[in-house]
Image: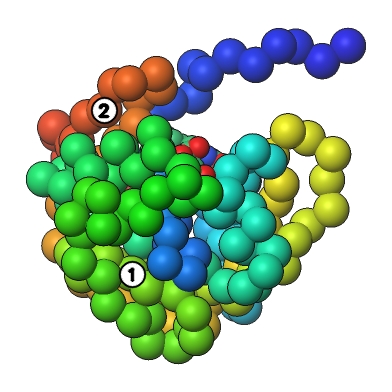
């Protein structure tokens, strides 16, 4: 018998997944390989972004700074099925560099452009494995991350520490 879901593993770093002209905040993502460079994404089966991922086979995993958190999170309370989020939230987009159909927010500090394939699974989230076609960003991207604490709570970095072996 499996245990019921408990969210004691938060915080998770919040990304923004852009697919086509739509985007949504995503906490359930992780890198899974350096060579080849790959990410794994967990997508709720009710999201419009799921149909877009299946249709386009591409996505951009974007990282926005703490200062942009309000609209990033708001995008998770709207669906691209009913709203043009970029227009509604007033977010300027630019074309991705390698992806053909996807637009990314101009304010993203790091962007990973992915070609995705669905990974068969029977959970309540669909899994997508994404090969990185193009990566861009700098050290600035990790300075003030948006950390998701669960429910409606967020934080950014407080203390940092460098380990010296
Ligand atoms: C902080 C936060 C984190 C989220 N993380 C995920 C996630 O990892 N996977 C997912 O499928 N949905 C996640 N969501 C939910 C989607 O962002 C939300 O359902 C969104 O409205 C989907 O938009 P769409 O219908 O345009 O695809 C998250 C929402 C919030 C607010």
Identify the disc placed on residue 45. none
Residue that label 1 marks = 104
Between 51 and 105, the one nearer to me in the picture: 51
Residue 12: image location, x then y, percent: 41, 36
In the image, residue 46 sits, relative to residue 80, either above or below, namely above
- CB at disc 1 and ligand 1 closer than 8 Å: no
Which residue does the image show at 58% across and 43% down from the upper left?
47
Would you say residue 162 is visible in this rendering?
A: no
Q: Nearer the viewer, mark 2 or mark 1?
A: 1
Which residue does the image show at 37% across and 55% down from the upper left?
84
Would you say residue 117 is visible in this rendering?
A: yes
Between 83 and 131, the one nearer to me in the picture: 83
In the image, residue 44 sits, relative to residue 55, either above or below, namely above
Residue 145: image location, x then y, percent: 23, 46
- Classify mark 1: residues with Cα within 10 Å, few (<14), some (14-19) or many (20+): many
Between 154 and 74, the one nearer to me in the picture: 74
Residue that label 2 marks = 154
Total marks in image: 2
In the image, residue 120 sits, relative to residue 125, either above or below, namely below
Which residue does the image show at 35% across and 61% down from the upper left?
62
Residue 129 in which image quadrant: bottom right
Marks 2 and 1, how far apart in space? 23 Å
- Report whether 121 appears left or right of 135: right
Q: Is disc 2 in contact with disc 1, using a CB cutoff of under 8 Å?
A: no
Residue 115: image location, x then y, percent: 60, 76
Secondary element under disc 1, as helix, strand or loop, is strand
Single out the residue that lies furthest toward the right. 1
Residue 26: image location, x then y, percent: 45, 45
Which residue does the image show at 42% across and 67% down from the upper left?
21
Quadrant for the N terminus, please.
Answer: top right
- CB at disc 2 and ligand 1 closer than 8 Å: yes
Q: N-terminal of the two: label 2 or label 1?
A: 1
């Amino acid at each position: 018998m499996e245990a019921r879901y408990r969210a004691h593993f938060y915080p998770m770093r919040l990304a923004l997944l852009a697919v086509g002209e739509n985007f949504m905040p995503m906490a359930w993502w992780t890198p899974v390989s350096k060579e080849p460079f790959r990410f794994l994404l967990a997508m709720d089966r009710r999201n419009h972004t799921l149909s877009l991922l299946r249709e386009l086979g591409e996505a951009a995993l974007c990282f926005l700074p703490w200062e942009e958190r309000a609209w990033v999170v708001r995008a998770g309370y709207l669906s691209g099925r009913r709203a043009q989020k970029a227009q509604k939230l007033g977010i300027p987009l630019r074309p991705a560099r390698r992806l053909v159909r996807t637009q990314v927010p101009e304010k993203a500090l790091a962007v990973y452009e992915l070609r995705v394939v669905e990974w068969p699974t029977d959970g309540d989230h669909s899994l997508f494995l994404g090969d990185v076609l193009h990566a861009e960003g700098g050290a600035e991207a990790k300075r003030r991350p948006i950390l998701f604490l669960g429910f409606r709570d967020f934080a950014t970095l407080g203390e940092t520490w460098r380990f010296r072996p």
